[in-house]
Amino acid sequence: MANSKTEKQLSVPSKYEPLLDGDPRLRSLDLQLSQEAVAAKPMFSIQEADVEDLPDWAEDEPAQAVTAPKLNQHLISCTAFTRDAKGEASFFSALFKQEAKLKQVGVVQEAKAFTVREVNGVETEVGVAVRLQVEASEFSSDTHVSIPNIAAEAQLGMSRAQMEISVRGFAGPLGDLLPAPESVNLTSYAQYLEAFQKIQKHVFSKESQGEVTPVVLGQHRPPAGAS
């Protein structure tokens, strides 16, 4: 029987890779999807036009006048990542100290509604998402990388960390739902988590569906060695 004290906890690479703010792929992928939608059929809102102004195809097929994708999948997920010296990120479903040592680490918690499309041969999630993201200069604990564990290390002065809430694919106002900037610690984490829950409830409410403007959220990478 193996000694549990000496067993190493293995990190698990993530098939899903969220595209983070600043990723150079975001702009080109969003632009490509927009161009494909326009080429397939002009984006047209029947509610904002007189019937006599409708194009011929919209008069014949009113149910198809709006080409926004149907977001038929709903998920709450949590993905950890490391950044190397070049700033490139590697994503994990579970991340432990041996992979995180001497690297920047972070965690992205997402609540999202999406559909999956193939873009340039890669499965790509397109939809709306509320994200809580924390990133730290390093990670030292003998446990898995998580938002509360990063916040605890930052509170003890063991690392420098930053935390943010972002919303992708939503055009409506958020107003006082957004939290004020705070240094990262367990108290501010609790405050941001509460704000995340309120924003999630607002964005995915029935009343807010008209404000959803789907964008690229992330991509699914094939297993290593797959053709």
Image (tube, rainbow, N blue to C red):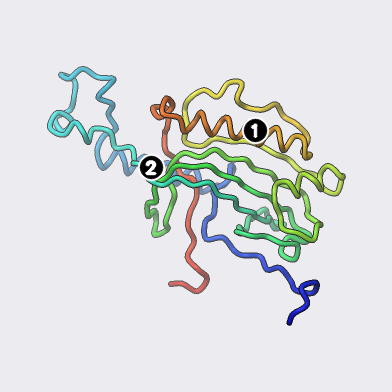
Going 59% across and 63% down the picture, which residue do you hit? 13
Secondary structure under the numbered disc 2 in the rendered image: loop
Out of 40 and 12, give the one closest to the viewer: 12
Residue 184 locus on image (x, y percent): 77, 38
> In this rendering, is residue 20 above or below 42?
below
Q: Identify the residue under disc 2.
A: 71
Quadrant the C terminus occupies: bottom left
Q: Residue at x 46, y 39 (%)?
A: 128
Comparing 48 with 33, the one in front is: 48
Q: Split into 4 quadrants, where in the image is the N terminus?
A: bottom right
Circle 1: element type = helix
Residue 197 image-quadrant placement: top right
Q: CA distance from mark 2 to mark 1?
A: 25 Å
Q: Relative to residue 62, is residue 33 depicted above or below?
A: below
Residue nearer the viewer, 156 or 167: 156
Identify the residue under disc 1: 194
26 displayed left or right of 89: left
Q: How many marks?
A: 2
Q: Amino acid at mark 1?
A: Glu
Q: x%, y% of residue 89?
A: 63, 55
Q: Residue at x 70, y 39 (%)?
A: 163
